[in-house]
Image: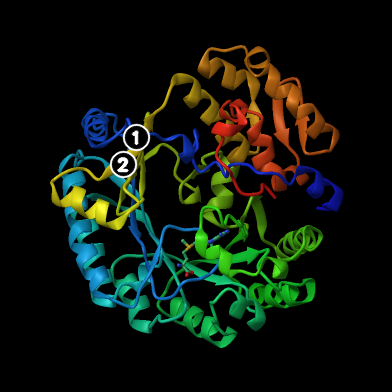
Amino acid sequence: MKLSADLLHKYVKAGPRYTSYPTAPYFNESFGPAQWEQELRASQDQGRDISLYAHIPFCDTLCYYCGCNMIATKDYSKATSYLEVLFQDIERIAALTNPARQVRQLHWGGGTPTYLKPDDIRRLAAHMTGKFNMAVDAEIGCEMDPRELTRDHVRALRASGFNRLSLGVQDLDHQVQVAVNRVQPEVLIREVYGWIRDEGFASVNFDIMVGLPHQTLSSFERTLDTVIAMAPDRFAVFNYAHVPWMKKHQKLIVEETLPQLDVRLELQKLTLEKLTAAGYVYIGMDHFARPDDELVKAQQLKTLYRNFQGYTTHKNCDILAFGASAISQTDDVYAQNSKVLSDYRSMVEAGQLPVERGLRISHEDKLRREAITSIMCDLELDKAAFGGQWGIDFDQYFGQALEDLKAMQDDGLVLLEADKVRVTEAGRVFLRNIAMAFDSYLAQPASDKPRYSKTV
Ligand SMILES: C[S@@+](CC[C@H](N)C(=O)[O-])C[C@H]1O[C@@H](n2cnc3c(N)ncnc32)[C@H](O)[C@@H]1O
């Protein structure tokens, strides 16, 4: 795929990542514990499968680029007491869940879940899997930081049933690593990767970041060549979202050292070219996978879905999420737990569901969510099938969206056919921009709008 810098320049603007629709900034505080409990009680008989998520917010040190909900601390007692609260949170939700419903997916994110000591990894995994009805072939995954990791952590994960791991590699260049306060030499990554494969993990993802301070084409080419040679099954390539107005610690990154837009775009082109030349299939946005990977198969079968964990192979799962800041989802509702650890703790200890805000979504939201999901996951929208499913005349209902997409068609990003809207190969890089045409919240007055990161 040839990607022109002109196109990247033209379409680089602020926009949502569409891990939900409506996006999280539109959740509100009139949705709280009572509403979430009511929804949980009402949504048990639908027979929908479940995806479980646990958020472990702790990290040993602060990575200056970090955009996640995390706390850097060396005080492990914080994790021990968090686990006790997390256990209560899990128990309370499990008690409200129909035991016949199957868990297809379980994921630990952070922060850094492998901040937990191996014994605590075992305890938490046993607690979660013991309280729910796990499918025998459930995908069980965990994010990990190669630093401070031991072989025992990897063994504990494997013994606890984990079958997918995601390793935060980011960039292998020393100067870049120093600038973001995350020094992890290549030998360390190789050693950890060796343990993971030796312990029998068949699915490994590497997180890589584009747009970090001091990244140059030649330094990043070396990183890419090295990680490609290691042959993980998937790559998540994130564009560094620099949002210092939201994440104050990102001010520790000297802005003058960030690659200029032109370099950033060249870095993106290089990544795309190198990964596809190495045989990885570009799923879209930030995800690449080997041709035989479940993500690629799911995209072909149109069962790929996008949620708070990024792309996932399981459509139509409700997400039950535990821990501070974690977001749950049913077909009708989003519910986010309190982000502040002390608030999360006091709500759980008071016997409440620790939900701080959320949203019951409208019929129109659902319809638009489905359209955005089709664009992001299937890379096309079948107008007749969609219109039939939702009882609308597609061309009429989405008249404005189709009008907005004409300019993108002229740029070769979409094909507006009589029966389909189709994303082209080049359009995969601009999925956020294409999806934005179907988002009715973006038309709000500028002062109410959330400030998103850049789309490309
Ligand atoms: C929640 S983090 C967990 C990874 C784990 N803590 C580690 O240290 O590797 C998941 C990934 O988000 C990405 N990430 C974090 N901050 C980001 C930002 N500001 N912009 C883009 N991607 C970011 C990184 O690639 C990171 O590996």
From this view, report whether residue 304 is shown above or below residue 292. Answer: above
**Callout 2 touching callout 1 (CB < 8 Å):** yes
Please give the residue where the numbered disc 2 appears in the rendered image: 356
Q: Amino acid at mark 1?
A: Glu
**Residue drawn at the location 30% of the way across and 54% of the way down:** 323
Relative horizontal placement of residue 26, taking residue 295 as reference (left or right) = left
**Mark 1, residues whose alpha carbon is within 10 Å: few (<14), some, or many (≥20)?**
few
Question: Residue 208 at x, y = what percent?
Answer: 60, 66
Question: Residue 130 at x, y = what percent?
Answer: 19, 57
Question: Residue 61 at x, y = what percent?
Answer: 43, 75
Looking at the image, can residue 233 be seen? no
Q: CA distance from mark 2 to mark 1?
A: 6 Å
From this view, report whether residue 400 is shown above or below residue 73. Answer: above
**Residue drawn at the location 13% of the way across and 46% of the way down:** 351
Residue 165: mark: none
Residue 29: mark: 1
Question: Which residue sits furthest bottom?
Answer: 187
From this view, report whether residue 193 is shown above or below residue 67. Answer: below
Q: Secondary structure at mark 2?
A: strand
Q: Secondary structure at mark 1?
A: loop
Question: Residue 222 at x, y = what percent?
Answer: 72, 78
